[in-house]
Image (tube, grey):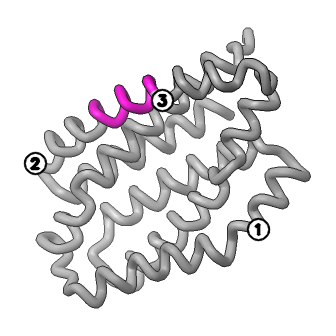
Amino acid sequence: MRRLPATTVSYGIEFFADIGFHAATTVMAVYFVQEVGLNPLELVLLGTVFEATIFLFEIPTGVIADTYSRRASVIAGLALEGGASIATGLTESYPGLLAAAALWGIAATCLSGAYEAWITDEVGVENVGRVFMRNSQFGYAGAILGALLGVAVALLDLGAALVVGGAITLATALILV
């Protein structure tokens, strides 16, 4: 199988990962309040678990990405993000939601910096500005489509929007493998 150019892969990651992310997160707060019935304190604690996980895992995942593989870190981050989104959409259990928030935080740290460093390694410092600009365009298009998809699915079932978004993000990771 022929390997695609790094720029094509990067554009695909931006487009499809943003579709998945925005399909899930556009309706996530509504899901938490209407479907699960979380109160303000529980919502704040979910966010706190997410942010604390990022704080704890930023350096270890960065070291792994820099010493082992930035590409593998990006794939792992997308897979974990997709899994966290699916888990969030499938549970109404608060401990389950806390675990999913922690998983989502680990995913964020796997992606943090590794994606930008990977594409810079692939295309070179002199070309990366153009690639980042084009990535933004693909990302915005994916975000719009993802938000529309998330709302459309949420009209049928709020939790399903998170599952669909997670499935798209997970599929993006699997295709990258």
Q: Amino acid at mark 1?
A: Ile
Which residue shows up at 49% across the image and 73% down it?
50
Name the N-terminal-most of marks 2 and 3: 3
Q: Which residue is denoted by mark 2 in the rendering?
A: 156
Under tag 3, what secondary structure?
Answer: helix
Placement of 130 over or under 132, stated as above or below: above
Is 64 one of the magenta-colored residues? no
Placement of 72 over or under 47, stated as above or below: above
Mark 3 Cα-neighbour bin, 10 Å: few <14, some 14–19, many ≥20 = some
Mark 2 in CB contact with mark 3 (< 8 angstroms): no
Residue most extreme to the right? 67
Query: Which mark is drawn over residue 18?
Result: none
Q: Nearer the viewer, mark 2 or mark 1?
A: 1
Q: Which residue is denoted by mark 3 in the rendering?
A: 136
Q: Which residues are magenta?
A: 137-145
Residue most extreme to the left? 155
Q: CA distance from mark 2 to mark 1?
A: 40 Å
Q: Nearer the viewer, mark 2 or mark 3?
A: 3
Which residue shows up at 62% across the image and 19% down it?
130
Count the numbered circles shown: 3
Mark 2 Cα-neighbour bin, 10 Å: few <14, some 14–19, many ≥20 = few
